Amino acid sequence: MTDREKILIALQEKPLKTFEIMKRVNIKNQDDCQSLLLKMRDDGAVKFDIHKGHWLAPKA
């Protein structure tokens, strides 16, 4: 399973902050995690709530 798939599974359960995603998906480098999340946001796979600072999976 890729990090991308793990992130989507984690975010389907509940919105998470970047550090929480890093712990759940086991990504050591914050820059790598942030870069992957931004790419996923550009693809429309995840969304970012700027008011709460949480990443979330879009509703299906």
Image (cartoon, rainbow, N blue to C red):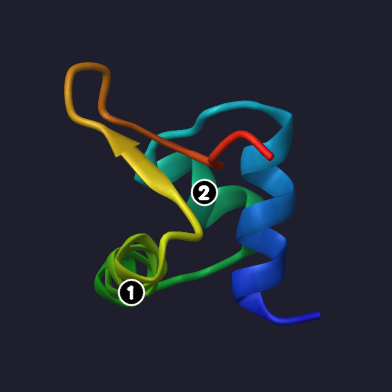
Q: In the drawing, what numbered circle is on residue 21?
A: 2
Q: Amino acid at mark 1?
A: Lys
Quadrant assignment, res 49: top left
Give the SS element for disc 1.
Answer: helix
Q: Earlier in the sequence, mark 2 or mark 1?
A: 2
Residue 33 place in picture, x, y as percent: 38, 68
Residue 58 place in picture, x, y as percent: 54, 40
Query: Is residue 7 shown left or right of residue 19?
Result: right
Q: Closer to us: mark 2 or mark 1?
A: 1
Tell which residue pokes out farthest to the right in this image. Answer: 1
Towards the viewer: 16 or 46: 46
Quadrant assignment, res 6: bottom right
Tell which residue pokes out farthest to the left in this image. Answer: 51
Give the SS element for disc 2.
Answer: helix
> Is 50 rendered above or below residue 52?
below
Q: Amino acid at mark 2?
A: Ile
Quadrant assignment, res 7: bottom right
* Quadrant of the frame with the C terminus: top right
* Quadrant of the frame with the N terminus: bottom right
Query: Is residue 58 shown left or right of residue 33?
Result: right
> Is 43 rendered above or below residue 55?
below
Q: Residue at x 73, y 31 (%)?
A: 13
Q: Residue at x 26, y 18 (%)?
A: 52
Residue named by callout 1: 39
Q: Are marks 2 and 1 in contact (CB under 8 Å)?
A: no
Q: Residue at x 28, y 65 (%)?
A: 38
